[in-house]
Image (cartoon, rainbow, N blue to C red):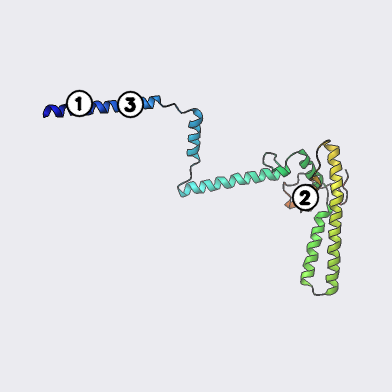
Amino acid sequence: MAKNDSNQSNQDENNQSLNSDQSGSDKKNRPTPSRKEAESKNRKSAFAPANTKEEKAAARLEERERRQKLREAYMRGDESVLPARDKGPVRKFIRDYVDSRRMPGEYIFYLLFISIFLSAFSKARALQAIVVIIMYLAVIALIGHALILKRVIRKAVEEKFPGEPTKGLGMYAFLRSTQMRRLRAPAPQVTPSKGLFQFRK
């Protein structure tokens, strides 16, 4: 009986040794992780969700700073962060062309706003009739401004960038010309040096 127990114990030890050798062999036979895989694993650990309040607060602060830097770069006209509609030397040229002039569109919207305000708070029919006429005239002036600006912009682009497609550039210039200067994005990089209706160079 003791002999059988001894044989069983020896067999168990042999099995454990065999399993250990096989486990070690499996680890050796396993392919060594590449540098790319290791860097990817480390990157995942770095971007793992924050657990503590301090980590979450730091992550929020970092994200806010990142967005602020992107916003500042966008307002400067940095090509690396501009959306497709604002990218390229042609769009930059149009922005500078519009920003260097006092455009009628800037003031027409002020006029429309004042007219709407007066018509809303005044019960005098004569004043309301005048306001309606002013609004119609302002709309007509705005349409005329858009048509003239479109032609001028197309000609200026054809001279500055021969062979460049001009589709959509007139509308791009018009929409920017109707915005208040301080609300334009990207922000104006030039100061207005041309007259109110001076479209040509």
Q: Position of residue 199 (x, y in %)?
A: 87, 47
Residue position marked by numbered label 1 in the rendering: 10
Q: Position of residue 146 (x, y in %)?
A: 84, 52
Label 2: element kind: helix
Residue position marked by numbered label 2 in the rendering: 176
Q: Nearer the viewer, mark 1 or mark 2?
A: 1
Specify the quadrant of the image occupied by residue 112.
Answer: bottom right
Residue position marked by numbered label 3 in the rendering: 22
Q: Give the quadrant of the N terminus.
A: top left
Label 1: element kind: helix
Label 3: element kind: helix
**Cα distance in 3D space between marks 3 and 1:** 18 Å
Of residues 115 and 24, the one drawn nearer to the viewer in this rendering:
24
Q: Sequence order check: which comes first, mark 1 or mark 2?
A: 1
Q: Are marks 2 and 3 in contact (CB under 8 Å)?
A: no
User: Residue drawn at (23%, 27%), measured in percent from left and top?
Assistant: 13
Kind of residue at badge 2:
Arg
